[in-house]
Image (cartoon, rainbow, N blue to C red):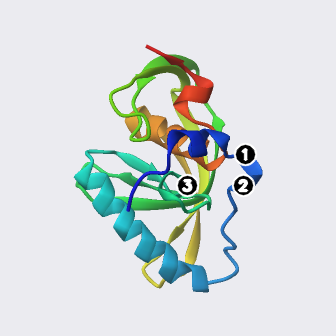
Amino acid sequence: MKLVTVEKLEALQREDIKFIDIEDLSYVKSIKSFSAKMAEFLVKNNGVGLSACQVDKFEKFFIIKLDNGSCVIIINPVYYATGTRYKVVEACLSYPDKGFMVKRYRRIQADYWSIDEKNDFLFQRKNYMGDFAEVFQHETDHCYGKTIATIGKEV
């Protein structure tokens, strides 16, 4: 597994990255399998989040590494601001050794699908704050064709 080029990532348009059809349970196995490979890549590269489109799969899902080392799969994500915005310098695996000043919301309401223990899609609506909210916003941006370079300023 390898990252797509920055040029390819920045050229992606919102419509290039497809929603997962949550009515089609045949996607579950492929998402879980691909996410496991993404998790290995994430650990190997010291990341905290990775969007499928960063590794050449143009579908709206990503993983976030939790404090305990496991990863959670986030499918068809959207978020809504429930707090104020702040400026923060973020890094990204797609832009090694660079930082970008971006604006993020302190608190968000996140709507997404996950995969439950029965291998069914499960709708989630949760409120997040702190680091998890920041990573959720960062990875969701990738799902909609945005990067920290296109929405922020290099520092």
Rendered location of residue 43, percent (x, y): 25, 54
In the image, 19 versus 13, the foreground residue is: 13
| Horizontal relation, residue 95 to residue 97: left or right | right
Q: Residue at x 32, y 53 (%)?
A: 42
At label 1, the amino acid type is: Gln
In the image, 18 versus 119, the foreground residue is: 18
Q: Residue at x 44, y 40 (%)?
A: 94
Above or below residue 143? Residue 59 is below
In the image, 101 versus 129, the foreground residue is: 101
Q: Residue at x 59, y 86 (%)?
A: 26
The image quarter containing residue 147 is top right
Q: Residue at x 33, y 52 (%)?
A: 65
Callouts 1 and 3 close, C-beta under 8 Å: no
Above or below residue 70? Residue 135 is above
Residue pointed to by mark 2: 16
| Horizontal relation, residue 5 to residue 65: left or right | right
Query: In the rendered image, which quarter contains the C terminus?
Result: top left
Which element is circle 3 on?
Answer: helix
The residue positioned farthest toward the top in the image shown: 155
> Considering only order in the chain, which callout, 3 or 2, is on the residue closer to the N terminus?
2
Query: In the rendered image, which quarter contains the N terminus?
Result: bottom left
Circle 2: is it few (<14), some (14-19), or many (20+) Cα within 10 Å? some
Label placed on residue 53: 3
What's the distance in space between the residues labelled 1 and 3, CA to CA?
11 Å
> Considering only order in the chain, which callout, 3 or 1, is on the residue closer to the N terminus?
1
Circle 3: is it few (<14), some (14-19), or many (20+) Cα within 10 Å? many
Which element is circle 1 on?
Answer: loop
Circle 1: is it few (<14), some (14-19), or many (20+) Cα within 10 Å? few
Residue pointed to by mark 1: 13
Label placed on residue 31: none
| Horizontal relation, residue 153 to residue 49: left or right | right
